Image: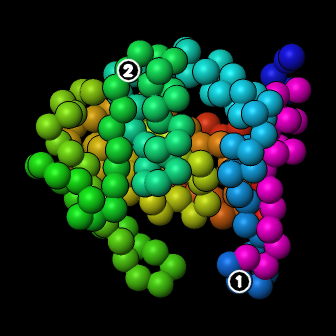
Amino acid sequence: MDKNDKLEILKNAIKSYPDFPEPGIIFRDIFGVFHDIVALRAMKDLIVEHILVLEVDLIVGLDSRGFLFGPMICMELGKPFLPIRKKGKLPGKVTQQKYALEYGEATFELQTEFINEGTRVLVVDDLLATGGSMAAAVQLLKSVGADVRECLVIMELTLLKGRDKLSAPVHSFVQYDR
């Protein structure tokens, strides 16, 4: 099966829910992929084929769907995984980064004992929309001296221009204009 076939299988497994969570929004749900083993294998293959050329030391997954992809990537690359979590969820020494939400503010945290100056990082999540959480993650990682090599997402809502907020390269497999 070639790359285009795998992309088509992946796209077909992503479920769309109009008017959720509010009217006018189309919610793109990655969990449809996890209900379809053929689509899940296609997604894993696409990720692995893409990341094999990246030189990274650490995989960082964003709370919470990045936790689904990060360990899978770690197993393929033989590299460790580190979560970026919402405030108050991680023990030990952490550093924080605040970011704006549609109606308020949130804070990400990262355990600093597992990352060193110059660590080459791949950041993973399921979706890039407005870019606020991914930008906060990149900023948080850079604040501890990490070299963010790429932000990898399965889906991207291109109309929202989230990648414009990022100071690191972005790769997405499936793009939607809304």
Q: What amino acid is labelled 2 in the image?
A: Lys
Residue pointed to by mark 2: 79
* Quadrant of residue 28 within the rendered picture: bottom right
Q: Residues within 10 Å of mark 2 (few under 14, many from 20)?
A: some
Residue pointed to by mark 1: 22
- Asked whether, in this view, residue 105 is left or right of residue 40, the answer is left
Q: Is residue 19 magenta?
A: yes
Q: Quadrant of the N terminus?
A: top right
- Residue 75 can be seen in this image: yes
Q: Position of residue 157 (x, y in %)?
A: 70, 57
Camera-nearest residue between 145 and 75: 75
Q: Are marks 2 and 1 in contact (CB under 8 Å)?
A: no
Q: Is label 1 in a helix, a strand or a loop? A: loop
Determine the residue positioned at 77% across, 85% down.
23
Q: Position of residue 119 (x, y in %)?
A: 27, 27
When the figure is inspected, residue 123 is found, relative to residue 45, above or below; the finding is below
When the figure is inspected, residue 175 is found, relative to residue 170, above or below; the finding is below
Q: What amino acid is labelled 1 in the image?
A: Glu
- Which label was assigned to residue 108? none
Q: CA distance from mark 2 to mark 1?
A: 39 Å
- Asked whether, in this view, residue 128 is left or right of residue 80, the answer is right
Q: Position of residue 53 (x, y in %)?
A: 55, 14
Magenta-highlighted residues: 5-20
Determine the residue positioned at 11% across, 49% down.
93
**Colour convention of the picture:** rainbow
* Quadrant of residue 22 within the rendered picture: bottom right
